[in-house]
């Protein structure tokens, strides 16, 4: 599910809109996704590369975008035969540009809501009930 490029837009909360410009249907190690994330009227263009993909995790690393550096580790931890916890760990460095620094701070502050929505939407799309063991979300910032 998470390796499909269409999943990103499907699990992104409103009012954010994601438009994928180019990406393979199924993302693999070394593939890139070029997309625009609309935060209200503000278009934010990203180019992300998929790295270190295995059955249990992958990293999406910003090649270009609003941050000076962005690395998002997605880890999938089996809980039992029917449930998997998705653990997100983000390491980012804000841009030196004052405008993108402001945008980055606001995006960073919204990550807990974003990940909570994505967890809910993923469970809904996959037809699963909420796990009794919540998926972990860890965010780490560096400057």
Image (tube, rainbow, N blue to C red):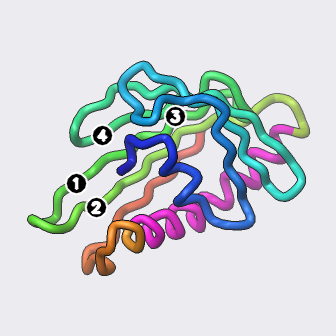
The residue that disc 2 covers is: 85
Taking the spot 46% from the left edge, 23% from the top edge, the residue there is 31
Look at the numbered discs 2 and 4 and tell me whether their residues touch, using CB distance below 8 Å.
no
Mark 3 or mark 4: which is in front?
4
The residue that disc 3 covers is: 71
Task: Tell me the magenta residue range.
Answer: 100-122
Among numbered discs 3 and 1, the one appearing first in the sequence: 3
Q: Outermost residue toward the left?
A: 81
Kindly indicate the quadrant of the structure image that contains residue 59: top left
Look at the numbered discs 2 and 1 and tell me whether their residues touch, using CB distance below 8 Å.
yes
Using the image, tell me which numbered label, if any, was put on residue 57. Answer: 4
Q: Circle 3 sits in a helix, a strand or a loop, which is it?
A: strand
| Mark pair 1, 4: CA separation | 9 Å
Residue 131 is at least partly visible in this image: yes
Is 12 in the magenta? no
Q: Residues within 10 Å of mark 4 (few under 14, many from 20)?
A: some
Taking the spot 36% from the left edge, 23% from the top edge, the residue there is 29
């Amino acid at each position: 599910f998470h390796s499909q490029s269409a999943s990103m837009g499907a699990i992104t909360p409103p009012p954010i809109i994601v438009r994928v410009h180019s990406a393979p249907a199924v993302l693999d190690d070394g593939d890139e996704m070029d997309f625009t994330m609309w935060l209200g009227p503000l278009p934010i263009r990203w180019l992300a590369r998929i790295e270190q993909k295995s059955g249990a995790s992958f990293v999406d690393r910003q090649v270009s975008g609003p941050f000076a550096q962005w690395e998002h580790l997605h880890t999938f931890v089996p809980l039992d035969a029917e449930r998997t916890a998705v653990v997100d760990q983000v390491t980012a460095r804000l841009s030196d540009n004052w405008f993108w620094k402001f945008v980055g701070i606001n995006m960073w502050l919204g990550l807990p809501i974003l990940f909570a929505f994505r967890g809910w939407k993923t469970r809904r799309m996959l037809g699963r009930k909420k796990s009794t063991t919540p998926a972990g979300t860890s965010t780490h910032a560096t400057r």
